[in-house]
Amino acid sequence: SKLLFDTINQVKQELNATSKNVQDELHAMDNTPLKKVVTHRFEPTSKYVLLFIGGLALSLVISIWGNLAQWREYQAWEVADLKYRALKMVLPSDDPNVRYIEKHFSVCRDEKVIDDVRNCVAAYEDSIRHHHEMVEMATYKDSIANKLLQESNRIIRAMKSSK
């Protein structure tokens, strides 16, 4: 029975030692930080993804609109340059107007003269536009007057035929 008692005590001590080792390992695991595995998923229905895609689309539209406006302005400058060169080609080289423009725009740049020319050109373009609007208005009123004259002639004929 003593042998059995000694064997049980020995097994008990081994279990206590093993249990103590396991408890120490568990305690050590509690104190060490755990490695976390973080995964990112691309969810197209996510609010942030939709906002990002919307922002990209908006910036693309604004960029295209800005480039288109810049391209149109560039085209207008090209047309204006072509008109000026055509006028220089058609007018004689000693024309005083051409020499005046060349002098104050290219050779001796004078901002006051350039502003005066800009104002004169704006006034000229306004007068041309106003003249065109007046011609359109006169044409419209003339067509209305012709229709009224035709209607009055029809009424006069109808009155004469009823007598």
Image: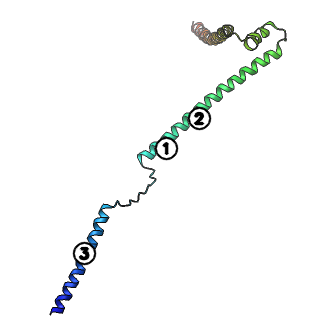
User: Alpha-carbon neighbours of circle 3 within 10 Å: few (<14), some, or many (≥20)?
Assistant: few
The residue identified by callout 2 is 64
Label 1: state its secondary structure: helix
Give, as a three-letter code, the residue at label 3. Ser
Mark 1 or mark 2: which comes first in sequence?
1
Label 2: state its secondary structure: helix
Q: Residue furthest left?
A: 1
Question: Residue shown at 55%/34% (left/top)?
Answer: 62
> Real-space Cα distance between discs 3 and 2?
73 Å
Question: Residue shown at 79%/18% (left/top)?
Answer: 86
> Real-space Cα distance between discs 1 and 3?
57 Å
Give, as a three-letter code, the residue at label 2. Ile
Apparent side of residue 106 relative to residue 1 in the rendered image (left or right): right
User: Alpha-carbon neighbours of circle 1 within 10 Å: few (<14), some, or many (≥20)?
Assistant: few
Apparent side of residue 13 relative to residue 40 in the rendered image (left or right): left
Q: For this rendering, which residue is in front, 28 or 123? A: 28
Q: Which mark is residue 53?
A: 1
Give, as a three-letter code, the residue at label 1. Ile
Question: Residue shown at 46%/53% (left/top)?
Answer: 42
